[in-house]
Amino acid sequence: MSGWIDIAGFFLIALMVAAVLVRALLRARRVAAADGAERAMSVYRDQLAEVERDLARGTLGTDEAERLRLEISRRILDLDRGAGARRVGGPAPDAMRWVALGVLLAAILGSGALYLSFGAPGYPDMPLVERHAQAVEARANRPRQAEMEAEFAARFPEGEEFDGRAELESMVAQLRAAMADRPLDITGFTLLAQNEARLGHYRAAIEAQIRVIELRGGEEAPVSDLAYLLDLMVIATGGFVSPEAESVIEQILRRDTQDPVALYYSGRLYAQTGRPDLTFRIWRRLHDLSAGDDPWMDEIRGALPELSRISGEPRYTLPPRPAPAGAREPSAEDIEAAEDMSPEERAAMIEGMVDGMLARLANDGGSAQDWAQLLRALAVLERRDQALDILQEARTVFAARPEDLALINDAAAEAGLSTPAP
C-alpha cells in the first residue's frame, strides 16, 4: 500500500510541475506578443523624433520629412490593429509550442518510468551516510542472546507435540543425569544437545553443544560443531542473530570463508540491522555455493530480487536454481571411489548421475557447459536417440546465444552426433 501511495505522490508532483510549466508557456506567449508590440512602438517613436531632428538641422527636406512621417504613422496604425505585433517580436509559432509541450510530457513520463525501474517505491528517503550510521547503531544496541531467548520462550512456552514425546522426555532426563557423572563423554553430550533441541529445550541444547565443542578442543573443534551451535542459538531466539551468535559466525568464517550456515546467518544479521545491501552480496554468493535442495535456498531465492532493487542493482537476474546435492556432477572423491567399483557398479553410478543431470536441466535449466557435458555422457552410454533429442532441445534453448550454441555443436561433433547444425 505504501508503494502505491509513493507512486501516486510522485505523479501528483509531476503533474503539478507540468501545470506550472504549461502555464509559463502560455503566459510567455502573451508576454512575447505584448513585448513585441511595445518594442515596435518604441522604435517608431524614435524614428519620428529622428525625422524632426533631421528636419530642424536641415539635413532632411520638408517633402521627404512629410513622406517619412506618413509612412511611420501608417506603421503605427497597423501595429494598433495587431499586424505589427505579429511582424515584430511575436510569439513562437504554434508548431514550436507543441514541440515544447511534447518534450515536457516525454520528460514527465520518462522520469516516471525511470523511477519505477530504478527507484524503490515504498521505501522512505534514506541518505547513505545516515542509513549506515543507523545500521551501526542498531547492530551495537540489539538485544543480547539471553534476553531474546527469554522473550521467545515466553511466547512459545510449549514445545512441539509429536508422537513419542513423553518417552523422549524420560530418556533425555536419564541422559542428563548420566552426563552429570560423565563430564568427558563427547558422544553423550552430542546426543543430549540433539535431543534437547528436539524437545524445544534450546538453552539446554546450547549448553550441551558448548560442552561438546570444549571437549573437542574449543577453537580446534570441527567447524560443523560451531555451525550447529550457531543454528541452535538463532533458533532459540526465534530467528534473531544476537551479538553472541555473531561472535560464533566470526569464529566460523575465520576458519572457513565459504561455510554456508555462517553465510546464511550473516546475511540475516545485516538484514535485521539495516544493511540489506550487504545481505544481498552475501546471499548472492551463498546462492552460488549452495545445492538446490539446501534448506535456505527457498528463502534466499525469494529475497534476492527485492534485495537487488533495494541495493541499487535492479538489473540483477536470479539465476536458475542449482542442482540438488544428489544430482551434482561427480566430485574427485566420487571418481576415486569409482576406480574400485566393478564395471556394473560403475555403469550404474554413471547412469544415476546422467539421470540426475537430465532432471535438473529439465526442471531448472543450466549452462551450455552442462548441456554439452550431458550430450557427451549420453553418447558414452550409447543412448544416441535420447542424445539427439537433447541436442535439438539445446539448440533451441541457445539459439539466440552464438557462443553457447557453438559450444553445443562442438560437443555434439565430439560425441559423434552428426546432425546438421542450424
Image (cartoon, helix red, strand yellow):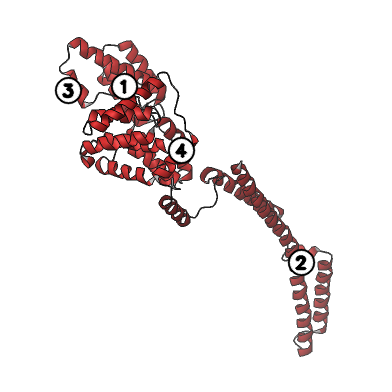
Residue at position x 73%, y 61% in the image? 27
Q: Nearer the viewer, mark 2 or mark 4?
A: 4
Residue 73 quadrant: bottom right
Which comes before the other along the chain, label 1 or label 4?
4
Binning the other alpha carbons within 10 Å of mark 4 as few (below 14), some (14 to 19) or many (20 upward) gives some
Q: CA distance from mark 2 to mark 1?
A: 83 Å
SS assignment at label 4 = helix
Q: CA distance from mark 2 to mark 4?
A: 76 Å
Binning the other alpha carbons within 10 Å of mark 1 as few (below 14), some (14 to 19) or many (20 upward) gives some
Which residue type does callout 4 highlight? Phe
Q: Are marks 2 and 1 in contact (CB under 8 Å)?
A: no
Q: CA distance from mark 3 to mark 2?
A: 93 Å
**In which quadrant is the N terminus drawn?**
top right
Between 128 and 91, the residue placed more toward the observer is: 128
Q: Are marks 3 and 4 in contact (CB under 8 Å)?
A: no
Q: Where 73 falls versus 112 (above or below)? A: below
Residue at position x 48%, y 39% in the image? 306
Mark 1 — residue?
A: 326
Q: Are marks 3 and 2 in contact (CB under 8 Å)?
A: no
Find residue 254 and report its horizontal and vertical position in percent.
26, 44
Mark 2 — residue?
A: 34
Mark 3 — residue?
A: 336
Mark 4 — residue?
A: 152
Which comes before the other along the chain, label 3 or label 4?
4
Q: CA distance from mark 1 to mark 3?
A: 17 Å
Which comes before the other along the chain, label 2 or label 4?
2
Binning the other alpha carbons within 10 Å of mark 3 as few (below 14), some (14 to 19) or many (20 upward) gives few
Residue at position x 27%, y 18% in the image? 377
